[in-house]
């Protein structure tokens, strides 16, 4: 939470978040994600490292890597549909 607060206070155009809601309960995580998306991340570039699908609401594009190689890259809706077995 302290690292996330420092990131918000920095007000940089490039934001890197690594599992930003890992230590939060689900209700707090949802509120943090909503506030980040609606208030803080406008006009910013975000690099998000996560294993939590709910965090992906913050991004427009998903790049999935495996063993250091890109295995999927595209718009969030397309990649999420591919991963769930549906057509985008």
Image (cartoon, grey):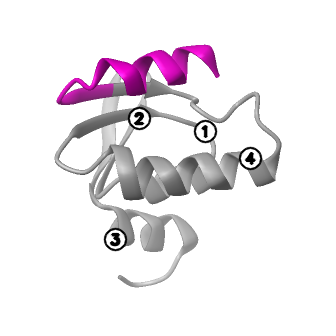
Q: Please tell me whether the stretch drawn in magenta is mainly helix, strand or loop.
A: helix
Vertical side of 49 occupied by 61: above or below: below
Dot 4 and dot 1 residues touching (CB under 8 Å) = no
Secondary structure at numbered mark 2: strand
SS under mark 4: helix
Can you see residue 53? no
For residue 84, above or below residue 12:
below
Region in magenta: 1-15
Neighbours of disc 2 within 10 Å: few (<14), some (14-19), many (20+): some
Identify residue for label 2. 48
**Is residue 67 left or right of 41 when viewed as pictured?**
right
For the residue pair 48 and 35, the one nearer the viewer reads as 35
Sooner in the amino-acid sequence: mark 2 or mark 4: 4
In this view, the mark in front (2 or 4): 4
Q: Residues within 10 Å of mark 1 (few under 14, many from 20)?
A: few
**Alpha-carbon distance for marks 2 and 4?**
18 Å
Residue identified by numbered label 3: 78
Q: Which residue is mark 4?
A: 28
Check contact, mark 3 vs mark 1: CB within 8 A.
Answer: no
Between the C-alphas of marks 3 and 2, the distance is 18 Å
Label 3: few (<14), some (14–19) or many (≥20) C-alpha neighbours in 10 Å: some
Residues under labels 2 and 1: Cα distance?
A: 10 Å
Q: CA separation, marks 4 and 3?
A: 28 Å
């Amino acid at each position: 939470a302290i690292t996330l607060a420092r990131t918000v206070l920095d007000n940089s155009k490039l934001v890197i978040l690594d599992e930003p809601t890992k230590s939060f309960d689900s209700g707090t995580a949802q509120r943090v994600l909503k506030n980040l998306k609606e208030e803080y991340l406008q006009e910013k570039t975000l690099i998000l490292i996560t294993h939590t699908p709910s965090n992906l609401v913050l991004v427009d594009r998903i790049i999935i890597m495996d063993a250091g190689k890109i295995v999927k890259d595209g718009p969030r809706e397309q990649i999420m549909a591919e991963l769930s077995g549906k057509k985008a």
